[in-house]
Amino acid sequence: MSPTNPVLNHHISSQFNEELRDVNTKFMTMGGLVEQQVASAIRALLDTDASLAIETQFQDNVVNRYETEIDEALTLILARRHPAAIDLRMVIAMSKANTDLERIGDEAAKIARIAQNLCEEGGSPRGYMETRHIGNQVRIMIHDALDAFARLDVDQALRVLLADGDIDREYQSAMRTLMTYMMEDPRHISRVMNVMWVLRSLERIGDHARNISEQVIYMVKGLDVRHTDVKEIEEKVQEK
Amino acid sequence: MSPTNPVLNHHISSQFNEELRDVNTKFMTMGGLVEQQVASAIRALLDTDASLAIETQFQDNVVNRYETEIDEALTLILARRHPAAIDLRMVIAMSKANTDLERIGDEAAKIARIAQNLCEEGGSPRGYMETRHIGNQVRIMIHDALDAFARLDVDQALRVLLADGDIDREYQSAMRTLMTYMMEDPRHISRVMNVMWVLRSLERIGDHARNISEQVIYMVKGLDVRHTDVKEIEEKVQEK
């Protein structure tokens, strides 16, 4: 894969090098697909594009297949190559992040399904401004998390963790706004509810991007920073 | 751990046997904790028990610590013992299921937080009957999935997959009922909304129990049955 990733070139066995590089390429391709799936789901919703909504749901099968293939490849590497140190951490991190990517794909498919329903009902409900805004931020988070993974970039990973905090705050605020819309005009409850599910999915996607970034820190520094406050993570990373 | 689990006794190295058994014991203990956490969260909600709700949220830290320790132990086993065949599959399955258990803990903490809010607001909103019913089923699913894991019981795992389909249908039906409540009496929108989030969490917990059961099938049969229809899984398992 990327020439900037030193892990993929340092092995005595060129066969092992190649296997790690192959699975890494697959992982990054899956990441790109998932990123695009999220973008399409949001676009389908905001542009009330029913055919894009349907297409985005089908794309989930491709993502699922990638998940299976990546796990298969990682298991073979574990069984045959007995990786150690950063190689082992890369395999473990990729196995965890693979699950997160697949879950992002699931959430994108859920958003696309809601988009399809809203297209059929017609009309543009409230809460789209919030969806566009949070949707854009979440897409950037996925992109940055994958970039951090590809370049073993801990600083970039830290920025994603910080961004997740912002998303959570904006999500809370958007939910309060939507709740007010519901109370003001109960005829729109069902539609506003759908937008709430979309926001919830976007918030979950942010969490998964955060998880992927935590795996980058684990891979590079050997630190398990899950369940740790961002400030504390920054300190730990600097000490190491 | 369990004498019924043949994987934990067949190694030439008694050290390896012990390591696998230790991590398995830890995993089952964590599973028991998580199961109890879900039960407490639902009880706190239904009995409007604020102190239980707070306690259940704190319990999440214990679960998180287990997750970290189990992953550490599994990484050491991979690095030192180079497990193969069913041993390797057990390590991989436990690593994946470990993430699912932790996520169940997260969802239980979310339910407990909502329970706490509802206690403070006072009064018992609609939708509790549905919550009790789905909550009970989901608890049984976690229990059965863990039991299947401990006993390498593929038939039990299959039953959990079937149960997840039931939960999904009951969840959809409960959500429709709650939507009706909202429209009938918009003054209760905020409260009913909270019950909806609880149901959503329960449905997610069911998905995680399903994931754990899929890992049991992977561990025992070497089959990756994620993203596969239950009927098709049953056929595949019988062929193998």
Image (cartoon, coloured by chain):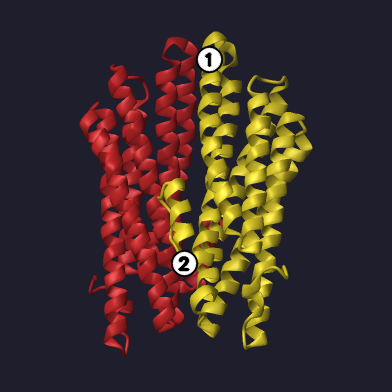
Chain colours: A red, B yellow
Residue B240 versus residue A163: which sits nearer the camera? B240
Q: Is residue B82 left or right of residue A101?
A: right
Height in image: A150 above or below A178? below
Crowding around mark 2 (Cα neighbors within 10 Å: few <14, some 14 to 19, many 20+) is some
Q: Is residue A169 above or below residue A125?
A: below
Q: Position of residue A110 (x, y in %)?
A: 38, 37
User: Mark 2 highlights which residue?
Assistant: B222
Depicted A165 relative to depicted B132: above or below: below
Q: Nearer the viewer, mark 2 or mark 1?
A: 2
| The N terminus of chain B sits in image quarter | bottom right
Taking the spot 55% from the left edge, 59% from the top edge, the residue there is B97
Q: Which of the 4 image quadrants contains residue B174?
A: top right
Check disc 1 and report the residue beneath it: B180
Give how far across and how far down residue B124 sits, in percent. Answer: 71, 21
**Residue at 49% from the left image edge and 76% from the top image edge:** B85
Residue B202 lies, in percent from the top left, at 59, 38
- Type of residue at label 1? Thr
Visible residue check, residue A176: yes
Name the element at disc 1.
helix
Does residue A240 show up? no
Chain letter belonging to callout 2: B
Between A219 and A172, the residue placed more toward the observer is A219
For the residues beneath circles 2 and 1, the answer to whether they share a chain is: yes
The front one of B1 and A46 is B1
Q: CA distance from mark 2 to mark 1?
A: 46 Å
Residue A26 occupies which quadrant of the picture? bottom left
Q: Position of residue A2 (x, y in %)?
A: 24, 70
Q: Residue B73 is drawn in which quadrant?
A: bottom right
